[in-house]
Image (tube, rainbow, N blue to C red):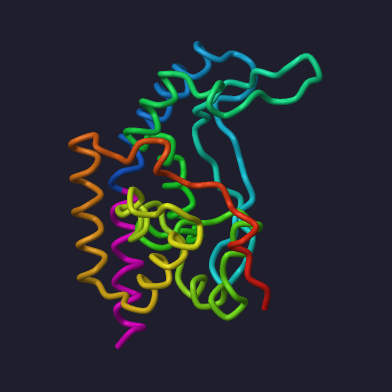
Amino acid sequence: MKKIKLSVKRCFDIVFALVGVIPAFSIIGLTALLVKINSPQGSPFFRQIRIGYHGKKIVIMKIRTMTNERDENGKLLADSYRLKKWGKIIRKLSIDELPQIFAVLKGEMSWIGPRPLLPKQMQVMTIAEQKERQSMLPGITGWEAVNEEKSDSRRKMAEYDLDYVRNWSLCLDLKILCMTIRKLFHGNRAEEQYRAPKLRKSEIRNG
Protein backbone atom coordinates (compact mmCIF):
# COMPACT_ATOMS: atom_id res chain seq x y z
CA MET A 1 0.00 0.00 0.00
CA LYS A 2 2.80 2.43 0.87
CA LYS A 3 4.43 1.81 -2.52
CA ILE A 4 1.17 2.72 -4.24
CA LYS A 5 0.87 5.91 -2.19
CA LEU A 6 4.48 6.82 -2.99
CA SER A 7 3.72 6.28 -6.69
CA VAL A 8 0.77 8.66 -6.37
CA LYS A 9 3.08 11.16 -4.64
CA ARG A 10 5.59 10.90 -7.49
CA CYS A 11 2.85 11.38 -10.11
CA PHE A 12 1.75 14.50 -8.21
CA ASP A 13 5.34 15.77 -8.26
CA ILE A 14 5.73 15.31 -12.01
CA VAL A 15 2.36 16.75 -13.00
CA PHE A 16 2.67 19.87 -10.88
CA ALA A 17 6.31 20.37 -11.87
CA LEU A 18 5.34 20.25 -15.55
CA VAL A 19 2.44 22.63 -14.96
CA GLY A 20 4.58 25.01 -12.92
CA VAL A 21 7.83 24.96 -14.90
CA ILE A 22 6.85 27.66 -17.42
CA PRO A 23 5.60 30.31 -14.92
CA ALA A 24 8.45 29.35 -12.58
CA PHE A 25 10.98 29.85 -15.37
CA SER A 26 9.63 33.37 -15.99
CA ILE A 27 9.81 34.28 -12.29
CA ILE A 28 13.30 32.80 -12.00
CA GLY A 29 14.48 34.81 -15.00
CA LEU A 30 13.11 38.12 -13.70
CA THR A 31 14.45 37.51 -10.21
CA ALA A 32 17.88 36.52 -11.53
CA LEU A 33 17.96 39.81 -13.45
CA LEU A 34 17.04 41.71 -10.27
CA VAL A 35 19.86 39.98 -8.37
CA LYS A 36 22.37 40.72 -11.13
CA ILE A 37 21.42 44.41 -11.18
CA ASN A 38 21.71 44.76 -7.39
CA SER A 39 24.75 42.53 -7.01
CA PRO A 40 26.64 42.27 -10.33
CA GLN A 41 29.58 40.37 -8.82
CA GLY A 42 29.05 36.69 -9.52
CA SER A 43 26.23 34.53 -10.80
CA PRO A 44 22.64 35.21 -9.66
CA PHE A 45 22.49 31.51 -8.77
CA PHE A 46 24.46 29.42 -6.33
CA ARG A 47 24.88 25.70 -5.98
CA GLN A 48 25.49 23.58 -2.90
CA ILE A 49 26.05 19.91 -2.20
CA ARG A 50 23.27 18.55 -0.01
CA ILE A 51 22.28 15.11 1.25
CA GLY A 52 19.44 13.56 -0.70
CA TYR A 53 17.52 10.31 -1.02
CA HIS A 54 19.18 7.36 0.76
CA GLY A 55 22.11 9.60 1.72
CA LYS A 56 23.18 10.28 -1.86
CA LYS A 57 24.81 13.66 -2.40
CA ILE A 58 22.93 15.98 -4.74
CA VAL A 59 23.62 19.48 -6.04
CA ILE A 60 20.81 21.93 -5.44
CA MET A 61 20.52 25.29 -7.13
CA LYS A 62 18.97 28.37 -5.57
CA ILE A 63 18.71 32.04 -6.47
CA ARG A 64 21.35 34.04 -4.64
CA THR A 65 19.92 36.28 -1.91
CA MET A 66 23.12 37.85 -0.58
CA THR A 67 25.86 39.99 -2.05
CA ASN A 68 29.41 38.70 -2.50
CA GLU A 69 30.98 41.54 -0.51
CA ARG A 70 34.33 40.72 1.10
CA ASP A 71 36.73 42.36 3.52
CA GLU A 72 40.29 43.50 2.74
CA ASN A 73 41.51 39.90 3.18
CA GLY A 74 39.06 38.51 0.66
CA LYS A 75 36.84 36.89 3.30
CA LEU A 76 33.09 37.11 2.84
CA LEU A 77 31.44 39.59 5.18
CA ALA A 78 28.87 38.44 7.75
CA ASP A 79 25.59 37.08 6.36
CA SER A 80 23.63 39.77 8.21
CA TYR A 81 25.55 42.48 6.32
CA ARG A 82 25.35 40.82 2.89
CA LEU A 83 21.61 40.13 3.13
CA LYS A 84 20.04 43.27 1.68
CA LYS A 85 16.38 44.27 1.41
CA TRP A 86 16.00 42.69 -2.03
CA GLY A 87 17.38 39.40 -0.69
CA LYS A 88 15.00 39.44 2.25
CA ILE A 89 12.03 39.88 -0.10
CA ILE A 90 13.18 36.96 -2.28
CA ARG A 91 13.51 34.76 0.81
CA LYS A 92 10.23 35.95 2.31
CA LEU A 93 8.38 34.87 -0.83
CA SER A 94 10.52 31.68 -1.15
CA ILE A 95 11.37 32.61 -4.74
CA ASP A 96 14.96 31.51 -4.09
CA GLU A 97 13.73 27.91 -3.89
CA LEU A 98 12.08 27.87 -7.35
CA PRO A 99 15.08 26.49 -9.32
CA GLN A 100 14.65 23.26 -7.36
CA ILE A 101 11.62 22.48 -9.52
CA PHE A 102 14.10 21.05 -12.03
CA ALA A 103 15.40 18.67 -9.33
CA VAL A 104 11.80 17.50 -8.88
CA LEU A 105 11.56 16.70 -12.59
CA LYS A 106 14.88 14.81 -12.38
CA GLY A 107 13.56 12.71 -9.52
CA GLU A 108 16.11 13.99 -7.00
CA MET A 109 13.53 15.91 -4.98
CA SER A 110 9.82 16.04 -4.23
CA TRP A 111 7.56 19.03 -3.70
CA ILE A 112 7.10 17.91 -0.10
CA GLY A 113 9.60 16.12 2.13
CA PRO A 114 12.52 16.72 4.51
CA ARG A 115 14.62 19.67 3.35
CA PRO A 116 17.99 18.60 1.85
CA LEU A 117 20.68 19.36 4.42
CA LEU A 118 24.35 20.18 4.21
CA PRO A 119 26.48 17.14 5.15
CA LYS A 120 27.63 18.71 8.45
CA GLN A 121 24.04 19.46 9.47
CA MET A 122 23.23 15.74 9.38
CA GLN A 123 25.35 15.35 12.52
CA VAL A 124 22.44 16.39 14.74
CA MET A 125 21.06 12.86 14.14
CA THR A 126 22.36 9.40 14.89
CA ILE A 127 23.32 7.23 11.91
CA ALA A 128 20.02 5.35 12.31
CA GLU A 129 18.05 8.60 12.34
CA GLN A 130 19.91 9.87 9.28
CA LYS A 131 19.03 6.71 7.39
CA GLU A 132 15.40 7.01 8.48
CA ARG A 133 15.15 10.68 7.54
CA GLN A 134 16.64 10.09 4.09
CA SER A 135 14.27 7.20 3.35
CA MET A 136 12.08 9.72 1.50
CA LEU A 137 12.94 12.19 -1.22
CA PRO A 138 13.94 15.62 0.10
CA GLY A 139 11.36 18.33 -0.53
CA ILE A 140 11.12 21.95 -1.61
CA THR A 141 8.79 22.40 1.36
CA GLY A 142 8.01 20.12 4.28
CA TRP A 143 6.71 19.66 7.80
CA GLU A 144 9.68 21.45 9.31
CA ALA A 145 9.47 24.23 6.74
CA VAL A 146 5.88 25.12 7.66
CA ASN A 147 6.84 25.03 11.36
CA GLU A 148 10.18 26.82 11.03
CA GLU A 149 9.25 29.55 13.52
CA LYS A 150 9.05 26.80 16.18
CA SER A 151 12.45 25.31 15.28
CA ASP A 152 14.93 27.07 17.54
CA SER A 153 17.71 24.52 16.97
CA ARG A 154 19.01 22.17 14.30
CA ARG A 155 17.99 19.22 16.45
CA LYS A 156 14.42 20.49 16.64
CA MET A 157 14.40 20.86 12.87
CA ALA A 158 15.53 17.25 12.51
CA GLU A 159 12.80 16.09 14.89
CA TYR A 160 10.13 17.68 12.70
CA ASP A 161 11.55 15.88 9.66
CA LEU A 162 11.71 12.56 11.51
CA ASP A 163 8.13 13.05 12.65
CA TYR A 164 7.13 13.62 9.02
CA VAL A 165 8.82 10.44 7.77
CA ARG A 166 7.39 8.33 10.60
CA ASN A 167 3.85 9.60 10.11
CA TRP A 168 3.83 10.25 6.38
CA SER A 169 0.58 10.03 4.46
CA LEU A 170 -0.93 11.69 1.42
CA CYS A 171 -3.23 13.59 3.78
CA LEU A 172 -0.22 14.97 5.65
CA ASP A 173 1.31 16.09 2.32
CA LEU A 174 -1.96 17.84 1.46
CA LYS A 175 -1.95 19.58 4.85
CA ILE A 176 1.65 20.76 4.34
CA LEU A 177 0.82 21.97 0.83
CA CYS A 178 -2.12 24.03 2.12
CA MET A 179 -0.01 25.46 4.96
CA THR A 180 2.75 26.37 2.49
CA ILE A 181 0.35 28.11 0.11
CA ARG A 182 -1.18 30.04 3.01
CA LYS A 183 2.26 31.19 4.18
CA LEU A 184 3.23 32.29 0.67
CA PHE A 185 -0.09 34.02 0.03
CA HIS A 186 0.09 36.01 3.25
CA GLY A 187 3.85 36.52 3.01
CA ASN A 188 4.22 35.45 6.63
CA ARG A 189 7.27 33.22 6.38
CA ALA A 190 9.25 33.25 9.63
CA GLU A 191 11.74 36.08 10.14
CA GLU A 192 15.44 35.42 9.62
CA GLN A 193 16.22 34.93 13.31
CA TYR A 194 13.79 31.99 13.43
CA ARG A 195 15.09 30.25 10.34
CA ALA A 196 17.97 27.81 9.94
CA PRO A 197 19.72 28.31 13.30
CA LYS A 198 23.46 27.62 13.39
CA LEU A 199 24.60 24.11 14.25
CA ARG A 200 25.80 23.96 17.85
CA LYS A 201 28.55 21.57 18.96
CA SER A 202 26.30 20.34 21.77
CA GLU A 203 23.83 19.08 19.16
CA ILE A 204 26.27 16.78 17.38
CA ARG A 205 25.48 13.10 17.90
CA ASN A 206 27.91 10.31 17.17
CA GLY A 207 26.77 6.88 16.02
* 36 left or right, relative to 20: right
Residue drawn 49% across the image and 62% down it: 155
Residue drawn 24% across the image and 39% down it: 184
The boundaries of the magenta stretch are: 1-18
Q: Farthest front residue?
A: 202
Quarter of the figure that contains the C terminus: bottom right
Measuring from the top left, give residue 16's x and y in whole percent: 29, 53
Quarter of the figure that contains the N terminus: bottom left
* Image position of 90 with respect to 117: above or below: above
* Image position of 82 with respect to 2: above or below: above
Measuring from the top left, give residue 97's x and y in whole percent: 43, 41
Q: Farthest right residue?
A: 73
Res 61 quadrant in image: top right
Residue drawn 69% across the image and 25% down it: 76
Which residue occupies the foreground of this view, 53 or 179? 179
In the rendered structure, does residue 93 fall within the stretch colored magenta? no
Q: Farthest bottom residue?
A: 1
- The number of numbered discs placed on residues in the rendered structure image is 0
